[in-house]
Image (cartoon, grey):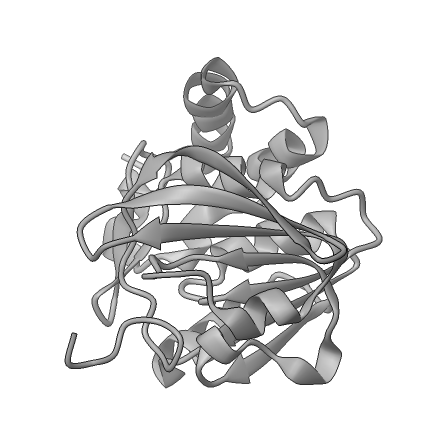
Amino acid sequence: MAVDYDTARKRMVAEQLVPRGIKDPRVLAAMRKVPRHFFMDPDMRSVAYSDRPLPIGEEQTISQPYIVALMTEALQLQGSEKVLEIGAGSGYQAAILAELARRVYTVERIPDLLERARSILEELGYGNVSFKLGDGTLGWEEFQPYDAIIVTAGAPRIPEPLYRQLADRGRMLIPVGNRYGQEMLKIVKEGDQMVKERLGGCRFVALRGEEGWREAD
């Protein structure tokens, strides 16, 4: 029996996001619009809108819809921003960001994931996303400063290069902790002051790179 993806997407928003406190109408509209199942292998599409992270290959995952919405809402995007995403993964988070920001720059260290994400986003018509293969913990200096930065992997600490590339009054969302669990942090740069807000526990795959977890860790 064929899955009605439009209905599944609306149900995801109504049952998983709204009851948990996601309120931003632009975020909710983006979550209703972007076809999450496009970013998954065909054999996983029937569960694309389930309330959990799902594998996308290369030992990586597509985040639980609620986590995507929570992080996106916390960035407080209005439409004019330049956003840096660390960890393109499936490309789904970049698509949500592309609905809400002026320009998205995404960095991914795994070539196959980057090319797959690029292909899907281009097929869907997102022309405001730029892609880079490399160490995301070092950011993307060429286009700094960024109004918002979102890190979609668990870090042992806040990478200094990313914080440096954040604009004044810019926001960063990053899970920080150990390999088995993290706390979602919202970081706001206010002049010389770093303001932190804790948004709760979470669990992400490891952020690999010079300013993240090393391969031997």
Which quarter shows the N terminus? top left
Q: Is residue 55 left or right of residue 166?
A: left
Asked where in the image residue 150 lies, by quadrant, the reply is: bottom right
**Foreground of the two, 124 or 188:** 188
Question: Relative to 19, is 191 on the left or the right?
Answer: right
Quarter location, residue 106 = bottom right
Instruction: Farthest residue to the right: give it.
Output: 80
Residue 17 pos. (x, y %): 48, 24
Whether residue 166 sits left or right of residue 71 in the image: it is right
Q: Residue furthest top?
A: 19
Which quadrant would the C terminus be assigned to in this image? bottom left
The answer to whether 99 is drawn above or below residue 111 in the figure is above
Depth check: 194 or 34 in front? 194
The percent coordinates of residue 75 (x first, y second) are 64, 44
Residue at coordinates 31% horizontally, 32% vertically from top-left? 51
Depicted 44 relative to depicted 132: above or below: above
Residue 188 percent across, percent down from the top left: 65, 48
**Residue 33 seen:** no
Position of 71 relative to 210 (above/below): above
Figure quadrant of residue 144: bottom right
Q: What percent of the width, then of the height, locates residue 34?
A: 57, 46
Asked if one can make out residue 184 in the rendered structure from this viewpoint, the answer is yes
Instruction: Please give the name of the residue rendered at 37% of the width and 82% of the height, measured from the top-left corner.
Output: 210
- Residue sitting nearer the eye, 42 or 145: 145
Q: Is residue 207 left or right of residue 15?
A: left
Number of numbered discs present?
Answer: 0
